[in-house]
Amino acid sequence: MLNQKNRSREILDSFLCCPDEANMDILVSYSRKYDLNDNEILYLANGLANSGDRIRLENGMNVCDIPSTGGPSSLSTLLCPLFLKILGNNVLKLGVPGRPAGGIDVLSQISGYKINPDLKQLYEWINSSSYVHFIASENFTPLDALLFQYRKRTNAVDIPSLVIASLLSKKIAVGLNYVGLDIRVSSFGNFGKTWDEAYHNGVRFNKIANLAGILSKCFLTNGNIPQQPYIGRGEAIVALQKIFTSNFDTYLAKHLEHCFAMANSISINKSSNGYSLNSLREAFYENIRIQEGLISSFEQIAETVNEQHKYNIYASESGVLSIDMEKIRKALLNIQSKSDELFPDNCGLILKAMSNTHIDKGEIICTFRCEDQYKEVFAIDLKSSFGTTLKTIDLNDFEEII
């Protein structure tokens, strides 16, 4: 046991001192085979946090955030910071690129919106607003950004110890006091493929976060079903515009309530009276202005994406709709990969029917958009994502881990 403990520290120190591909490969392989213990995960998280600039706010200033473990259809990384802000919290959201539509990816679609500030500019933003959203880069947690890219490239994003270290490194770097983790549970998830496995990992995340001096809660959400109908980078912008104009259906409304519940649970100030959509919109607009984005661009993207949704997928038979979210994710990533842009927005879908509901043959399941040269491929992949069953099933949907 002592030799293995020494070996773990040797591997961690080798990577932190010399983060080349060979040492990343050794770290990933070792973590998959043996796992890291809680103290080793915290050691790695601190090393990743200290690889770039650290944010140090005034003593007594509380900072919070709700990151996620990734997965399509949820808008929690966009909505939870807004809820936290209107509840009176300071929110410093340091993230990494998502797949296929993480929070920073969506915001980057807005013209002028800056996601990669240096330390001086970041403090200027913080002095002007209680919510900023930026990306891990050469300025902040650069080793985490490097290791995350390597893990994506080598299909190693689902190693729980490295997931915890990566998430916590960004929270440590910004001086977080409170964190809520949205664990998106699915058969293809990064942090638990079953509810029990995700629950176990969530309990461990809370324990290690507490060792770092961060009060933590985790929330389990079902990633095997769509959390809301708007799936894609531009589609997330459409969803936000629908919310801000009070023009949304019951599925988006339910997702809003889940996001609010997460934010309210970790907020220093609790609300028993719900929230105002106007306040939510103003919090979003303020963040866009602070980070030099154009609100007119946000509105134009929503309009353009709506206009581009001119293709339909129809039900081939009647029954209870089943949706394979892993296939939808792969369909989106396949088209996105054909672009050289950092955050391409060349496809997306809007569900017109949801999992576990009855659908008739010939009924529209979803609308979609895609660049013309890839439209047929995307349509085929989407069609394979939908099926029908004979009856509805009971589904776990949302659970909080104290």
Image (tube, rainbow, N blue to C red):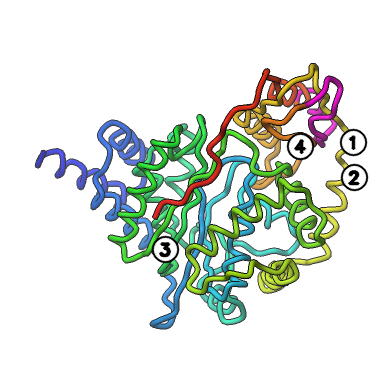
Tag 3 and tag 1, C-beta contact below 8 Å: no
Q: Which residue is mark 1?
A: 310
| Image position of 212 with respect to 205: above or below | below
- In space, the residues marked 3 and 4 are separated at their CA atoms by 41 Å
Which residue corresponds to the image point at 54% horizontal and 64% vertical from the top-left? 264
- In space, the residues marked 4 and 2 are separated at their CA atoms by 15 Å
- In space, the residues marked 4 and 1 are separated at their CA atoms by 13 Å
Which residue corresponds to the image point at 81% horizontal and 35% vertical from the top-left? 368
Q: Position of residue 191 (x, y in %)?
A: 44, 40
| Residue 351 numbered tag | 4
Which residue corresponds to the image point at 53% horizontal and 52% vertical from the top-left? 96
Q: Position of residue 93 (x, y in %)?
A: 53, 63
Closer to the chain start, of discs 3 and 4, is 3
Q: Which residue is mark 2?
A: 307
- In space, the residues marked 3 and 2 are separated at their CA atoms by 42 Å
- In space, the residues marked 1 and 2 are separated at their CA atoms by 7 Å
Front-most of residues 175 and 143: 175
Q: Position of residue 14 (x, y in %)?
A: 26, 47
Q: Position of residue 144 (x, y in %)?
A: 42, 52
Q: Nearer the viewer, mark 3 or mark 2?
A: 2
Residue 63 visible in image: yes
Tag 1 and tag 2, C-beta contact below 8 Å: yes
